[in-house]
Image (cartoon, grey):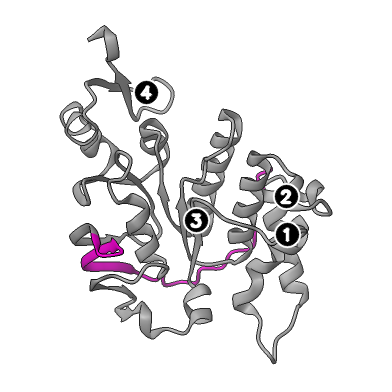
């Protein structure tokens, strides 16, 4: 990946994404009830928690992919269900945990699909679209893969292509469900550095579901910790990642020390050393 960033233009006023009193579930099985969250504009928020605690379910509700059984998700105070699909997609982009590309599609064509919300009968493909796609591919290091089909790529390469696709969408809010999945450690750090650069340099609001607590501590402005469908703590990394809270949420005995590189909390599992 390179340090180049797509020409995202969130605007002077960052939109506010908020969920109030959500009940979420699948096929009549509740995953979360009474769930509420306000996504802080222009911040990088990490959602953490053990498996099956509702992290991805919450993200899907915020992205309008999952309809709440009750409660409401709003964008700048307007229920997201009242917004046209393209109108919402120009404001919020989602990278799901598992994404499936059409058979035989090239990398360039898949990334170009990120421009769909900006197309209309009266506005077809433009030089601006071309620039956005090129910049997104450069930022994620997949420009040299443009002519290859997605299905022939490695898992890590595919993940970077999907990240390029949501970057090309040029939204002021990015929702990323485990964006470092399939990536080696070097590419994990590059993806997180890119997210932070988008947030700091372009004012993009980023929400990422992360499994690595130390990545969340180093890169997030704010951490939301979940357990069994509920938010049990939220705030700065130093406030949330305490030994007591990590053990409560994850059932993991640990020590929390200062990261000697970043100065952020560093979670050290005790394991058999306890």
**Count of numbered labels shown in the rendering:** 4
Look at mark 1 in the image and give the residue it sits on: 103
User: What's the mark number on residue 96?
Assistant: 3
Q: Main secondary structure of the magenta part?
A: loop
* Quarter of the rendering containing residue 243: top left
CA–CA distance between discs 4 and 2?
A: 39 Å
Whether residue 79 appears in magenta in the rendering, the answer is no
Query: Residue 225's quadrant in the figure?
Result: top left
Residue 259's mark? 4
Left or right, 28 with respect to 99, comes to: left
Task: First in sequence, mark 4 or 2: give its number.
Answer: 2
Give the label on residue 185, or none. none
Q: Tell me: 156 left or right of 236.
A: right
Q: Quote the CA–CA distance across marks 1 and 4.
A: 44 Å
* Residue on which the image places disc 2: 151
Say which label, 1 or 4, has the lower sequence index: 1
């Amino acid at each position: 990946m390179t340090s180049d960033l797509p020409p995202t233009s969130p605007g002077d006023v960052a939109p506010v994404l908020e969920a109030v009193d959500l009940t979420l579930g699948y096929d009549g099985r509740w995953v979360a009830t009474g769930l509420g969250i306000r996504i802080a504009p222009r911040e990088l928020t990490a959602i953490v928690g053990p498996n099956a605690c509702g992290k991805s379910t919450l993200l899907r509700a915020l992205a309008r992919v999952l309809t709440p059984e009750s409660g409401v998700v709003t964008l700048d105070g307007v229920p997201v269900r009242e917004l046209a699909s393209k109108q919402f997609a120009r404001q919020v982009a989602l990278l799901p945990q598992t994404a499936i590309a059409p058979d035989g599609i090239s990398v360039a064509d898949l990334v170009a699909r990120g421009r769909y919300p900006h197309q209309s009968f009266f506005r077809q493909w433009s030089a601006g679209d071309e620039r956005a796609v090129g910049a997104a591919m450069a930022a994620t290091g997949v420009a040299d893969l443009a002519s290859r089909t997605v299905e022939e790529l490695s898992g890590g390469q595919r993940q970077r292509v999907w990240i390029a696709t949501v970057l090309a969408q040029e939204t002021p809010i990015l929702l990323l469900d485990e964006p470092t999945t399939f990536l080696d450690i070097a590419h994990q750090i590059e993806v997180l550095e890119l997210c932070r650069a988008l947030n700091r340099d372009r004012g993009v609001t980023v929400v990422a579901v992360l499994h690595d607590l130390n990545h969340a501590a180093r890169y997030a402005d704010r951490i939301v910790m979940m357990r069994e469908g509920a938010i049990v703590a939220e705030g700065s990394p130093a406030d949330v990642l305490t030994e007591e809270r990590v053990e409560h949420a994850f059932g993991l005995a640990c020590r929390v020390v200062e990261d000697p590189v970043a100065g952020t909390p560093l979670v050290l599992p005790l394991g058999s050393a306890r």
